[in-house]
Amino acid sequence: MSILLAIESSCDDTSAAVLRDQYLLSNVIASQEVHRRYGGVVPELASRAHQQNIVPVVDEAVRQAGIELKEIDAVAFTRGPGLLGSLLVGVSFAKGLSQALERPIIEVNHLQAHVLSHFIKLDESTQTPQFPFICLLVSGGHTQIMLFRDHFDYEILGQTIDDAAGEAIDKAAKIMDLGYPGGPIIDELAQKGNPDAYHFATPNIPDYDYSFSGIKTSFLYFLRDQLKDDPDFIEHHKEDLCASIQNTIVSFLMKKLEKAVLKHHVRQVAIAGGVSANSLLRQRVTEAGRRHGWTVFVPQRKFCTDNAAMVGIAAYFKYLRGEFADISLPPYAR
């Protein structure tokens, strides 16, 4: 039996979690409201906020887990990718704590952690994927279709060649001045709109790769033309606009995902990453699962965005393999 403390600080959320083997004991997240006024994450402000949050967040995670620090067997941390200044805070804290406790450290790749979040157990009834499975990893910075043969044995079947899906959604929200973060706002407004009200072009990209810059540009030019005749067009039609742009992006995501799953004859399918919280994507992948006879894994929303629980579960499987990190390892942004 192992007890792991995990730390996540790759972007603008400071998080710490404690796991006993695969079972989650605590998962504490401190979000940073300071970025709302700027419409996006400001790296310098993010790293400062991590410095303020990390001690109380770790302390609360340990308290909620009902353990003492001396019981921890290893300290895990997100090494990258992410914002370098933010990562430095988590990496440095993890190294310092490991030295104080005389415990090993485990470095975790942020993207792998998102996928492996499906292996977090809350109780004995938790179902986890069986290998092989295909996962659509979709977030603000990454969009990839990945075939997993084991926890760390995977192949990237396709990925975006420019913008990520979450980036396109956030930029659409920014164009319409809806606020930050844009994804949840568009998702909420889309519930009241008509997804077929407007149609935006999707690129013809070969195989399983994606491109979202053209969708974003198509949306921008469409609004520019409409605003020439009606300066209040966005305000009068924002629900339909949100529903239409969301439908365009999700349909594009699902088209490639279905193509990849059917081609590789895989029956286990998952989604992960921040955009996996999107209600339309969750609905579409569930419907596809029923249609094709797949076993579909949709993460709880608390595990979609950046959190330390996913770092902890990835670290657990490394712990089993005895894969510990050297204290000199630096973080990496990309």
Image (spheres, rainbow, N blue to C red):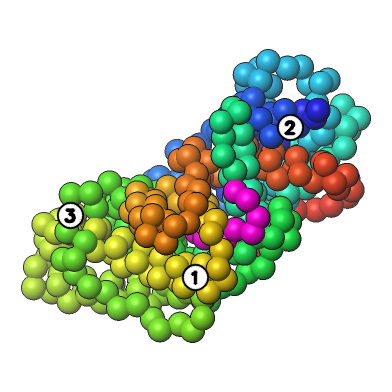
Which residue, given by chain and number where applicable, does mark 1 sit on?
Answer: 262
Q: Give neighbour class at mark 3: few <14, some 14-19, many 20+ (Cα, 10 Å).
A: some
Q: Give neighbour class at mark 2: few <14, some 14-19, many 20+ (Cα, 10 Å).
A: many
Q: Is residue 34 above or below residue 220?
A: above
Residue drawn at (42%, 61%) of the image: 292
Which residue, given by chain and number where applicable, does mark 3 sit on?
Answer: 193
Whether tag 2 and tag 1 are in contact, CB under 8 A, the answer is no
Q: Looking at this view, is 117 or 32 the one in front? A: 117
Please tell me the numbered disc located at residue 21.
2
Element type at mark 3:
loop
Q: In which quarter of the image is residue 55?
A: top right
Task: Measure how far apart labels 3 and 1 are at the Cα level.
Answer: 31 Å
Q: Can residue 50 be seen in this view?
A: no
Q: Looking at this view, is 231 or 165 the one in front? A: 165
Residue drawn at (72%, 56%) of the image: 150
Q: Considering the image in quadrants, where does the C terminus appear?
A: bottom right
Amino acid type at mark 3: Gly
Q: Which of marks 2 and 1 is in front?
A: 1
User: Along the horizontal axis of the image, is 309 left or right of 230?
Assistant: right
Q: Is residue 133 magenta?
A: yes
Q: Position of residue 52 (x, y in %)?
A: 62, 32
Residue drawn at (35%, 77%) of the image: 202
Amino acid type at mark 1: Leu
Amino acid type at mark 2: Asp
User: Along the horizontal axis of the image, is 109 left or right of 265?
Assistant: right
Magenta stretch: give its range.
Answer: 129-140
